[in-house]
Image: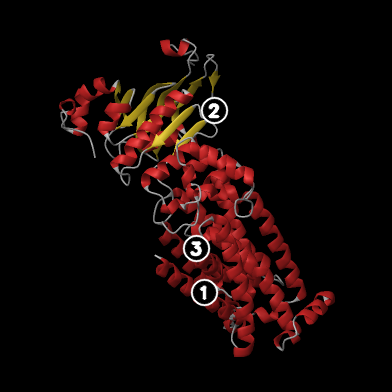
């Protein structure tokens, strides 16, 4: 078993996450195979690829929600291996309709404590929830219903939740639609700031190539069940596979964008 | 029990409250409706209305099996069978093969059909038709004891597991990422619903039991802006329609379970209209 991290960044006393030989199959149908990915702390890695390439599945496998082959190794700053790192997760969407009475406070308080939110609303809990939301400038949303939030506001609320406790690895599944460009820009900016503030390892499933170009430290292209290219945005966007997948000459300003 | 009756006599100086069966029925309503109000909030959140209906229907098969096996009280075979059905639906749901809606429909109608076939075997179904409409007025003191134990258990459980149930219902993957065993809580909630439905089915009736679960919460949803309001409105609406439905059924000489459901349906309509008007 390969227990030491040979990646130079990892041996410099910095933390990193290694996804090794991940494979996911549903019955006899293979969704992912031989996925290898190194994610360094303080880096925003954007995962891109066509619809149905398995991006969300990869996140759910990393979460341990889906059975998978291969392993996830997290090395903390002192080169100690942790098998079960704390993972923060921002899902694409929530399972609720617009009439749902669940408020932002309810969601966060329910996650932070065991005191039943249908009965208790203690003052110190309200303070804790507000503090949590303030980290992503969403304190004013506390008493709004989740169903009444815009796509961008909901993403920020979910992001604040994923940061408590501060995770070793942050997984973000960006919605395919439903967020306006302004909201999306705020979201990328917030994520990008958090990466520096908390020195986080972040994987962001991303659909907006312009924003990826601007904010990502590294890009991984997922297609045909596995990672096709990894590198800086410039490297990946120039890669031959990239134009195979997206069919555009991205470096000349024609591609990307929603 | 006589103590309770004396208190009730002192408090309720009404014509309808003079009879012991009405006192028992009122106590039954006071025990059943809050529990259904609480559970209903999550049933509606999780879009499980149809599933609740199937749970009610499965009770019929439970009764049949109980009768065939010669149990004096079919309640235990009912509870057992509805839990069994709950597990079956959960298992199929997890396998994620066909639409859950269809699966529940298949289970539900098969359970009803099996129940009717078994019960009508020697042409004696009429005896059991009471289960279809329910009879609140036949609640006995020992039934009330069972109901209070169930209500107490549900409230305690609701304090203990609600937050986790909420996260699971909002997004299972998110719940998983926070260390919650999604399958365990899903199952727990389903089993609690199954038990609550079966212990009350004799008095509410197979045909309308799911409405008692769904309507108060659905009405509360029209007005509530957070989970706490949602719960308090749901329980209040459930209690109000329970008590007023019971009294109305006394004067109208109608089936009490159905009258209760009708009152909550009216409340739903009113809150729905208010919601539309507010926009």
The subunit letter for the residue under badge 3 reads B
Quarter of the figure with residue A83:
top right
Mark 1 vs mark 3: tell me if same chain: yes
**Residue at position x 61%, y 66% in the image:** B235
Which residue is the site of mark 3?
B221
* Pointers 1 and 3 in contact (C-beta within 8 Å): no
Q: Position of residue B171 (x, y in %)?
A: 47, 46
Earlier in the chain: of badge 1 and badge 3, it is 3
**Residue at position x 80%, y 78% in the image:** B5
Neighbour class for label 2 at 10 Å: few (<14), some, many (≥20)?
A: few
Name the image quarter holding the C terminus of chain A: top left
Left of A237 or right of it: where is B60?
Answer: right
Q: Position of residue B102 (x, y in %)?
A: 41, 61
> Between marks 1 and 2, how big is the CA–CA gap?
50 Å
The label number, if any, that marks residue A84 in the structure image? 2
Which residue is the site of mark 1?
B267
Q: Position of residue B38 (x, y in %)?
A: 60, 61
The subunit letter for the residue under badge 2 reads A
* Pointers 1 and 2 in contact (C-beta within 8 Å): no
**Residue at position x 64%, y 74% in the image:** B202
Q: Is residue B11 visible?
A: yes
Is disc 3 placed on a helix, strand or loop?
A: helix
Left of B187 or right of it: where is A253?
Answer: left
Q: Position of residue A255 (x, y in %)?
A: 18, 33
Is disc 2 placed on a helix, strand or loop?
A: loop
Neighbour class for label 1 at 10 Å: few (<14), some, many (≥20)?
A: many
Applied colour scheme: secondary structure
């Amino acid at each position: 078993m390969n227990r030491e991290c040979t990646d130079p960044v990892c041996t410099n006393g910095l933390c990193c996450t290694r996804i090794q030989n991940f494979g996911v199959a549903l019955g006899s149908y293979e969704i992912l195979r031989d996925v290898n990915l190194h994610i360094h702390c303080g880096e925003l890695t954007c995962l891109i690829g066509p619809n149905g390439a398995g991006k969300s599945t990869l996140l759910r496998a990393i979460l341990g929600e889906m059975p998978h082959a291969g392993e996830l190794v997290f090395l903390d700053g002192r080169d100690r291996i942790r098998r079960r790192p704390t993972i923060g997760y921002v899902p694409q969407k929530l399972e609720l309709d617009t009439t749902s009475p669940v408020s932002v406070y309810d969601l966060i308080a329910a996650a932070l404590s065991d005191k039943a939110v249908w009965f208790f609303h203690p003052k110190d809990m309200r303070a804790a929830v507000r503090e949590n939301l303030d980290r992503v400038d969403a304190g004013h949303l506390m008493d709004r219903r989740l169903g009444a939030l815009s796509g961008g506001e909901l993403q920020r609320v979910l992001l604040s939740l994923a940061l408590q406790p501060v995770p070793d690895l942050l997984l973000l599944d960006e919605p395919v639609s439903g967020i306006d460009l302004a909201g999306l820009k705020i979201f990328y900016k917030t994520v990008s700031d958090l990466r520096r503030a908390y020195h986080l390892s972040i994987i962001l499933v991303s659909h907006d190539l312009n924003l990826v170009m601007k904010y990502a430290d590294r890009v991984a292209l997922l297609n045909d069940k596995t990672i096709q290219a990894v590198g800086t945005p410039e490297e990946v966007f120039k890669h031959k596979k990239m134009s195979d997948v997206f069919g555009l000459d991205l470096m000349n300003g024609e591609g990307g964008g929603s | 029990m006589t103590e309770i009756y004396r208190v009730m006599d002192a408090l309720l100086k009404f014509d309808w409250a003079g009879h012991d069966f009405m006192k028992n029925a009122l106590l039954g309503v006071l025990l059943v409706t809050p529990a259904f109000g609480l559970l209903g909030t999550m049933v509606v959140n999780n879009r499980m209305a149809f599933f609740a209906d199937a749970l009610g229907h499965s009770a019929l098969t439970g009764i049949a099996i109980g009768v065939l096996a010669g149990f004096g009280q079919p309640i235990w075979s009912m509870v057992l069978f509805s839990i069994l059905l709950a597990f079956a639906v959960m298992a199929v749901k997890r396998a994620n093969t066909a639409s859950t809606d269809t699966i529940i429909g298949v289970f539900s109608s098969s359970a009803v059909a099996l129940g009717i076939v078994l019960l009508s075997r020697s042409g004696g179904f009429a005896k059991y038709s009471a289960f279809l409409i329910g009879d609140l007025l036949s609640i006995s003191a020992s039934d009330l004891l069972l109901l209070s134990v169930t209500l107490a258990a549900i409230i305690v459980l609701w304090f203990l597991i609600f937050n986790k149930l909420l996260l699971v219902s909002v997004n299972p993957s998110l719940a998983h990422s926070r260390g919650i065993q999604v399958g365990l809580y899903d199952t727990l909630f389903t089993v609690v619903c199954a038990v609550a439905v079966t212990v009350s089915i004799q008095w509410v009736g197979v045909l309308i039991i799911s409405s008692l679960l769904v309507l108060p919460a659905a009405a509360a949803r029209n007005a509530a802006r957070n989970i706490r309001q949602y719960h308090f409105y749901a329980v209040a609406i459930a209690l109000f329609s329970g008590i007023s439905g019971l009294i109305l059924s006394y004067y109208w000489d109608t089936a009490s379970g159905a009258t209760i459901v009708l009152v909550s349906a009216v409340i739903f309509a009113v809150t729905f209209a208010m919601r539309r008007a507010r926009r």
